[in-house]
Image (cartoon, rainbow, N blue to C red):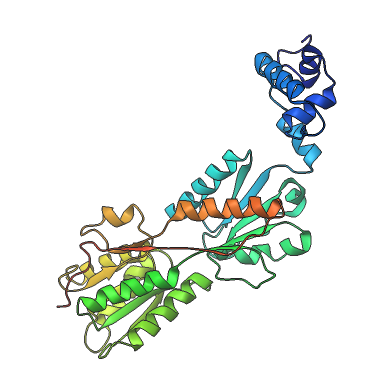
Amino acid sequence: MAGSDRPTSRDVARAAGVSQATVSLVLGGKWRGRVSERTAGTVRSVAGELGYRPNAAARSLRLGRTRTALLVVPALTHEYFARVYAGAARVADAHGFGVVLYPSPEGIGPARDPFGPARAAIDGVIASSMAADALAGIADGGLPLVMLDSGPGAQDGPPTVDLAVADGIRQVVRHLVALGHRRITHLAADVDTWTFKVRARTVGEELARVAGARPATERCGLDVASARDAAVRALTAPGPRPTALLCDGDVLAAGACKGARSLGLRVPEDVSVSGFDDLELATALDPELTTVRLPAEEVGARGMAALLALLDGAPVPPVELPVELVARGSTSAAP
């Protein structure tokens, strides 16, 4: 191995007494029908003894792939999307892929187009619906795409991996109703995406079926301060005070708790508060937060698996992952 400490395919071929083409066939898993079982065993044995590892970059060039996926998310600072990335990276690593993370500079809403001259260095894209506007050019550019939390797509659209968002909200509403709550205000995220539209629609549909229900809605940004202000508006509006605040996320629920306490109200004795996400924040609050647990890592893992299948030309059916209500101390019987 003159000139290098790292063995090459030529070194393996020389030691095994075969051609480099034979080494490539065997170590690339394409030897059956072309190379004998005995020769294949010899090549594998010699490669192991020499400590030979194929050059991943060169292999990617031969395959016409960079073995790189782009994950487009609204924010790096949100724990949910960090978990999505962890799940995607775990599956990618098991298949020799890397994941490049691209967050929206604004934290919510569409990201700027992350492609441009880098488009050729990406094999495919996994994207949150909250950054979907940045992806308008992907189909035209030929990049395979998998959408996360975007709702069932068109039959000829990109594969989708969704959460059972409507079911999660349904579980929260029924939990509050079972506790006797009828005056329920929805603190709704003021973000125009599928997931939040589904939440708002489901709250309305569920409460429309409840006799004596008096639903209301306060819209707010996806931050604690906006949610605190929305909670204060809801709790000081004319008429009977709401007995429960149903929030579109745990961060909003944290703001709602602050708003209630700023008015001298107790959670849950005077007003119940629920969230959605089951972040670490949910158990850091006092009382701990009733919320909906989302399998964020599984979303990322299934998204990456769908992209790998798409790259291999395999059929990719839509996926909907179940969610689970976690009842904790922030909700109790209506006062």
Residue at screen point 25% across, 63% down: 327
Which quarter of the picture shows residue 2? top right
Q: Residue at x 44, y 81 (%)?
A: 201
Q: Give the image location of residue 203, x and y in percent.
A: 38, 79
Q: Is residue 40 visible?
A: yes
Locate the C terminus by quadrant: bottom left
In percent of width and height, residue 286 lies at 21, 57
* Residue 103 in view in this figure: no
Image quarter hosting the N terminus:
top right
In front here: 139 or 52? 52
In the image, residue 116 above or below residue 169: above
Q: Quadrant of residue 160?
A: bottom right
**Residue 319 position (above or below residue 167):** above
Residue at screen point 74% across, 32% down: 28
Number of numbered discs present? Answer: 0
Q: Is residue 289 left or right of residue 194?
A: left
Image point (70%, 19%), residue name: 47
Would residue 285 appear left or right of 97 to someone viewing this image? left
**Could you tell whether 48 is left or right of 60 in the image?**
left
Image spot of residue 97 (x, y percent): 63, 41
Choose between 319 and 168: the one closer to the eye: 319
- Where does residue 236 sit, x and y in percent of width and height? 25, 81
Compared with residue 24, is residue 237 higher up or lower down, i.e. above or below? below
Q: Nearer the viewer, residue 54 or 88?
A: 54
